[in-house]
């Protein structure tokens, strides 16, 4: 059941920095060689709590998103850990099956087509990768 609209609006974040536990710029995430191919979920320890993060390593690139589905605000790996689609193109929410493009976070609305989901996306978290492979939170442009 969806929360009533006013209550729902209280949950809606518009940017990854809106989350109370958002990490500060430059926060260390890990070393690139240690990140597995595909999708990895983790909790980043910040001074304001744990920040839920998805790292996606595909085609030599790495993408990061807040691990909160815009449908019911659950982690994408709420029911099971394997959230990358077989073709490696989408992150699939384990709760109700919403699919998000791995490279953009945009929803693919073939399963959930309700009006409120059409413009949904995962919040992208900007990364910086140093020449020696250290991954940190990047400064937003
Ligand atoms: S919480 Fe419903 S699709 Fe993700």
Image (spheres, rainbow, N blue to C red):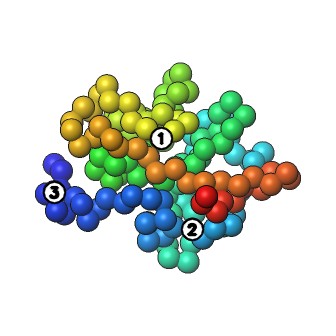
* Residue 7 rendering spot, x and y as whole percentages: 19, 63
Residue at label 3?
Answer: 5
Q: Which residue is at 41% across, 52% downward?
A: 68
Residue positioned most to the top: 87
* Residue 18 rendering spot, x and y as whole percentages: 43, 66
Q: CA distance from mark 1 to mark 2?
A: 19 Å
Which SS class for mark 1? loop
Q: Which residue is at 48% across, 70% downward?
A: 21
Which SS class for mark 2? loop
In this view, 47 is above or below 13: below
Q: Which residue is at 68% across, 30% downward?
A: 59
* Residue 113 rendering spot, x and y as whole percentages: 24, 31
Q: Is residue 9 left or right of residue 76?
A: left
The number of discs equals 3
Q: Is residue 47 left or right of residue 127?
A: left
Which disc number belongs to residue 23?
2
Q: CA distance from mark 3 to mark 1?
A: 23 Å
Q: Which residue is at 26% across, 65% downward?
A: 10
Residue positioned most to the bottom: 47
Q: Nearer the viewer, residue 128 or 36?
A: 128
- Label pair 3/1, CB-CB below 8 angstroms: no
Nearer the N terminus, badge 1 or badge 2?
2
Q: Residues within 10 Å of mark 1 (few under 14, many from 20)?
A: many
Q: CA distance from mark 3 to mark 2?
A: 28 Å
* Residue 125 rendering spot, x and y as whole percentages: 55, 54
Nearer the N terminus, badge 3 or badge 1?
3
Question: Is residue 95 visible from the viewing direction of this image?
Answer: no
Residue at label 1?
Answer: 105
């Amino acid at each position: 059941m969806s929360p009533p609209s006013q209550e729902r609006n209280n949950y809606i974040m518009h940017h990854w920095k809106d989350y109370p536990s958002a990490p500060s710029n430059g926060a260390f995430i890990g070393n690139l060689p240690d990140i597995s191919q595909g999708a990895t979920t983790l909790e980043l320890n910040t001074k304001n709590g744990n920040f839920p993060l998805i790292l996606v390593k595909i085609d030599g690139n790495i993408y990061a998103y807040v691990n909160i589905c815009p449908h019911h605000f659950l982690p994408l790996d709420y029911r099971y850990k394997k959230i990358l689609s077989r073709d490696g193109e989408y992150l699939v929410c384990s709760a109700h099956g919403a699919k998000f493009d791995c490279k953009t976070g945009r929803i693919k609305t073939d399963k959930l087509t309700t009006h409120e989901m059409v413009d949904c996306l995962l919040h992208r978290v900007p990364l910086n990768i140093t020449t020696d492979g250290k991954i940190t939170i990047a400064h937003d442009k």
